[in-house]
Amino acid sequence: MERQDDGDEPVGSLNHHDSAEEPGSPPLPRKLSGNLQQEDPAIMRRNDNYLPVPGEEKNLDADFNAKARSSESIPMKNLYGDDVSPLYPRLGPYLSDGRRRVDYVLAYHIQKPSSVRRRSSRFADNSFIRRLRRSLSMRGSQAPLQPKEDPEIAAQEQRTDYHEDDKRFRREEFEENLLETGLELEKDEGSKIPGIGFLKIHAPWNILCREAEFMKLKMPTKKVYDVKQGSNLVEKIRLFIHKVTAPLHPKVDANRPQSVKSLSHPFSREKQHLFDLSDRDKFFDSKTRSSIVYEVLKRTRCTRAKYSMGITSLLANGVYMSAYPLHDGDIEGVNAEPNDRKLLYEEWASYSVFYKYQPIGLIRKYFGEKIGLYFAWLGVYTQMLIPAAIVGVIVFLYGCATVDDNIPSMEICDPRNNITMCPLCDRACSYWKLMTACGTARASHLFDNPATVFFSIFMALWAVLFMEHWKRRQMRLNYIWDLTGFGEEEEDHNRAEYEFQVMQKTMRLEHSTPKGEKVKLTCTDRLPAYLTTVVTMCFMIAVTFAIVFGVILYRISIKAALHISNYPAARSNIRATVKTTAAIINLIIIIILDEIYAAIARWLTTLEVPKTDKSFEERLIFKTFILKFVNAFTPIVYLAFFRGRLVGRPGNYLYVVGSYRMEECAHAGCLMELCIQLCITMLGKQLIQNNLFEIGIPKLKKLLRRRKSEMDTKQEEELNKTLQRHEKDHFLGPFVGLSPEYMEMIIQFGMVTLFVASFPLAPLFALLNNIIEIRLDAKKFVMELRRPIAAKAKDIGIWYNLLRGLSKVAVIVNAFVISFTSDFIPRLVYQYMYSPDGTMHGFINHTLSYFNVSDFQPGTEPLQPMHLGYHVEICRYKDYREPPWSSTPYELSKEFWAILAARLAFVIVFQNVVMLMSDFVDWLIPDIPKDISLQIHKEKILMVELFMKEEQGKRLAARDNHNQDNFTSPSSADQSPPQPRSRPVSHANCY
């Protein structure tokens, strides 16, 4: 029979007969020896649950009481046969009995057995306790090591001062406290990984129920209802689309009906009859079990020392090496049983299924809602890139098709014009012919054509549609995953670092603080950290600007060096060489600084001591985003808006750092150079930083580990077959969060939207990268990382605000790129104001000003003025200035002011029109799909009906019981005296 009083058991007690009868628990021995039955109940409880793996050597981490050690063998006889083999052999993440599931694992260092180190009992050896207390008291005046964020990685890197005895003492206290909470523990110190012990944790049924009620976990009830996707026409269209796209759907959840959904309700032990508990092993899945155990671990503290330590502090200080839930099973091999991990590998983490949709439901089931939302968002983003990539390719092909009809580029390439241009640098550079820029002019037309304006407007609307589509998809997932209403009563635990700082402040203010007043960190306490953050961030941004300025000086100097070079190959294509090498240098610097800035942002966030993990994550994301955004886009912003603007004119150039003359744009504008920089930065970051690092670094670590172990591939495979699940997972990398994954995509989104006017192929490259990125991330999560803690989330958090901000900024940036970087506005102004026949003929001559070479400043004229074979008196340069024979020579002409006014007017009109269209689309599309809002309303009605029926059933049952109590048989009436009926009658009348 199902126990209804599980919830009435007090916290800290553990009934072993109940746990033995529950599904997934081993039978415990009923008959014990007389001595054992007289043992202390606490020791019996501890021994029955604290089962060491057979064959391991006893050391200081075991129970030190000899009597207790002898009692441990009695439960073990029931679990193991004479040949020391389990009576319940079972593959997968289970305890040594083969029945109880391992819900969580803590790994720790153990000292290797030594003849010098004697074995002693913790309770019998009083000198050990005295030494330990003395060491603790001596340490009381010293500040303990401050735990780092991301404790699993910190535990591997940080070398702590704690003595092994100190660590073991804290472990034992922590494990005793875990036993008090009702968890069942098993140690494994005889593993095949030398020097490492494992503590395996199992949560019995009553603990799962208790914690699920505390955490208010929504669980499916027995009540199911039909899910309708809208009207009959909408339903038919949906079914038709589903049938057409059937080959694109992964082969998961094939037997699950899509038209039926269970009604979910927060779990309650008093209302267990509402839930389907026919299979208790599957009611709480592995993801939920591990998250429940993690909540217990976070609440459990070590309090015997001067300061309280939780699991985060224990990990950071090296008391435990790592803490992680286990994967469901193996992926490959003959013995690999069917499990969700294997299914994810076959239907999601394989490159052969790149064309299929992602199994978002299975990802959420295995990894949790937070990771499920990330991959759902990445899938929506990748799908939305398909139309953007198609339109971008069409715009590019339009430029290719019309390049031969482009009059300005034809005029540049026409040798009959014979236009002599002024030198591009002082002394070393000579005069040059405009027709030598023919190739650059033709290439610029591919990206600088009338279709670019249309594409910029399209991408601005695309960004709004993408955001709206994601909001609707997010609401649909919230409904399917039962996340509606989540977050209202969500509790976030304080971080270990925050509690440690509060403890230190409490000790300082011990005598000055009134009793009962809660101590917390204020802005005054954090002021030094805030000032450090502001100063460091400004310094890092200044470093970025300085590096970009250094690359500018490189371009200027290398251009002059190539001009005076004696090698014809070096002088043949100077512009392309300088552009490409500078872009590659920028890319290398961006990749290096990205890693440095990520570490600096984490350090600054740790200094601020945020209170909760959520606050820590948001502050870290904000700092990292600012630094990486500035790092990635500063060279691009310079090329788009500053290069060629701060040059001066022949005879009066602007110089920096002594004799370095600021660089000019090519005659066709800086758009081509901007395109090259964007292309190399985007492709380089995606190929090197995102993909090559993610593939290469794990393989390199694996190769180094194999070399250290001095085993070949076959020996490693044989060892891997004999390792247990918790040992295999120990070799996997720790999960460091989703921030790096999101950051890659946010920077890519900026590349796609901010400067799309100069690079219409950006969506195509992003699409190709994301198709690989999805499978690469999937493989990393399934095969190379430990299983992360399943975290609930109803949205993507601060990342949505960053995306929305970027989409707004993109409109303004593209307006300025079209207006000031490209020649779109000057062409329009010339065609409608200055062209004699309304065409573009004569546009190139209109954009060039005249300069008399006799007006060069001394020492700046070319060294080889006869380079072209004739004497040059007048040269041309790109600008709108008065000619030397004018009354105001070299002053800005009226054409310059007319074009500037047109450019500013275009920015204002473009920005307001596109923003208005975006807001209209935002208003037109509702955030919540209509069918989902109806289903949510239907769920509320059904829930009310369910509780009304339950209440009515309780009343009827109470009335029936009352009537049975009032009814007395004649025989019983003769044998017993009549009882007063006033009370029961009054109770009956109440019903």
Image (spheres, grey):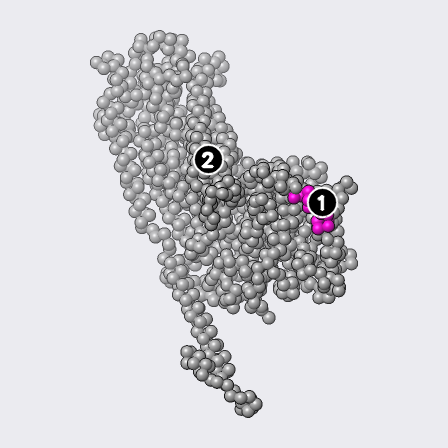
Instruction: Name the residue rendered at 39%, 58% in the picture.
Output: 932
**Amino acid type at image mark 2:** Ala
Q: Secondary structure at mark 1?
A: helix
- The mark nearer the N terminus, 2 or 1, is 1
Discs 2/1, front: 1
Residue tagged 2: 529
Check residue 124 for magenta coloring: yes
Q: CA distance from mark 2 to mark 1?
A: 44 Å
Q: x and y percent of residue 953 in the render?
A: 46, 74
Q: Is residue 344 above or below residue 31?
A: above
**If the image is split into quadrants, where does the N terminus sit?**
bottom right
Query: Depth check: 514 or 669 in front?
Result: 514
Q: What segment is highlighted magenta in the picture?
A: 121-133
Q: Label 1, on which residue?
A: 127
- Residue 361, position as x, y percentages in the image: 50, 54
Q: Is residue 231 left or right of residue 379?
A: left
The secondary element bearing badge 2 is classed as helix
**Residue that appears at 46% across and 81% down:** 984
Label 2 environment density (alpha carbons within 10 Å; few <14, some 14–19, many ≥20): some
Q: Is residue 818 magenta?
A: no
Residue 117 quadrant: top right
The residue at 58%/42% (across/down) is 316
Residue 595 horizontal side relative to residue 413, left or right = right
What is the number of callouts on the image? 2
Q: Is residue 26 visible?
A: yes
Q: Residue 161's spot in the image, x, y percent?
A: 63, 37
At x 49%, y 37%, the residue is 607
Is residue 721 something one can see in this rendering? no
Check the image and report above or below for 259 versus 710. Answer: below
